[in-house]
Image (cartoon, coloured by chain):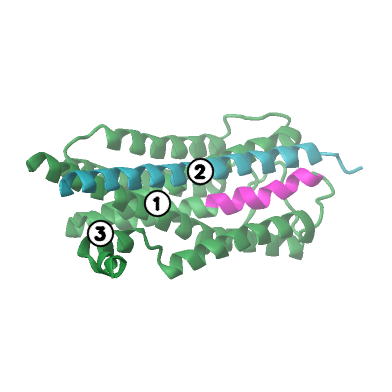
Amino acid sequence: MDIARNLDHPKTLEKSKRSAVPALLNGLSVLSVFAAAIILYMSLVYAGTDLTQGNVQRIFYIHVGSFAGAATAFFVSVVGAIAYLRTRSNRWDTLSVASIEVGLMLSVVTLCTGSIWARPTWNTWWTWDPRLTSAAIMALTYAAYLMLRTGIENPDKRRLFAAVYAILAISTVIFTTIIIRIRPDTIHPAVIGPSPVNSEGGFMMAENMSATLGTSAALMTLIVAPTLIWWRIRLENLLETIQKLQVKSLSN
Amino acid sequence: MMPDTTSYLYLGLGVVTVIVGLYIVSLYLRFANARKDVELLESLQEE
């Protein structure tokens, strides 16, 4: 009886509500694991081996997929930022910061996999090519967002600053995406669409390669990135609860 | 002749595993710490 009474207690209900993971999020998490397995299988088995680059070319499916996931997350952060500026509702700011953290992590994956692919292909780990430079600036811009955010103590000013920053920062994502189309001096291959004249390490993709690339980008965009963002939102909500409880404790 | 670049593929897969793994572990640890803080603050308020 005591146990039943405790379970019905409002605070117990509140706690269990807070810690309960939505069924959809659980489902998406399981799907994300399957998505990662599918990407790995298609990259390592289904896609086949590139005759000029060898096995390292398979890393490009993860490289492009992670960039697709990062770009999606950064665009979601803009949606959150614009919605926050319009409504001043904290949940939009939470969406924005969660998306940027996930996007930054995926950007680091993009930069690292690109660097590893470049070593045997271009004979260097890094070069100040326009595309590589813009991708590095993009990642640093979002890293700065997270650092600067923590430096503003006033919550309203922090959210306002973060929203404006997130809107401006998306220009680095757009620039990184289009630079291989507008700069002829880049050596970075354009995997999708027309290549610049002098790109090196380009792909003459077979059908199974295109399918692998498309699947990787789609799964990262539609399943993996949203799942990670949702988990990060839950963490941010928990951190906000702590702040509220701290304020309540101090005021008592 | 096709170049043998398999070691770079393994390096890439290893690096991706480390980055994503570290992020997921950091999320888990931050969740665990935040839950402990919430429980502590709630128990302090109940007293």
Residue at image position (74%, 47%) is: A57
Q: Amino acid at mark 3?
A: Ala
Instruction: Answer yes or no: are tags 3 and 1 on the same subunit.
Output: yes
Residue at image position (40%, 55%) is: A75
Element under disc 3: helix
- Viewer-proximal residue among A145 and B27: B27
Give how far apart the Cα atoms at labels 3 and 1 are.
18 Å
Q: Chain of mark 1?
A: A
Q: Which chain is cyan?
A: B
Badge 3 local density, few (<14 within 10 Å), some, or many (20+)?
Answer: some
Left or right of A131? Residue A161 is: left
| Res. A250 visible in picture | yes
Q: Which residue is mark 3?
A: A83
Q: Which chain is green?
A: A
Question: Nearer the viewer's eye, disc 2 or disc 3?
Answer: 2
Q: Amino acid at mark 1?
A: Arg
Q: Which residue is mark 1?
A: A232
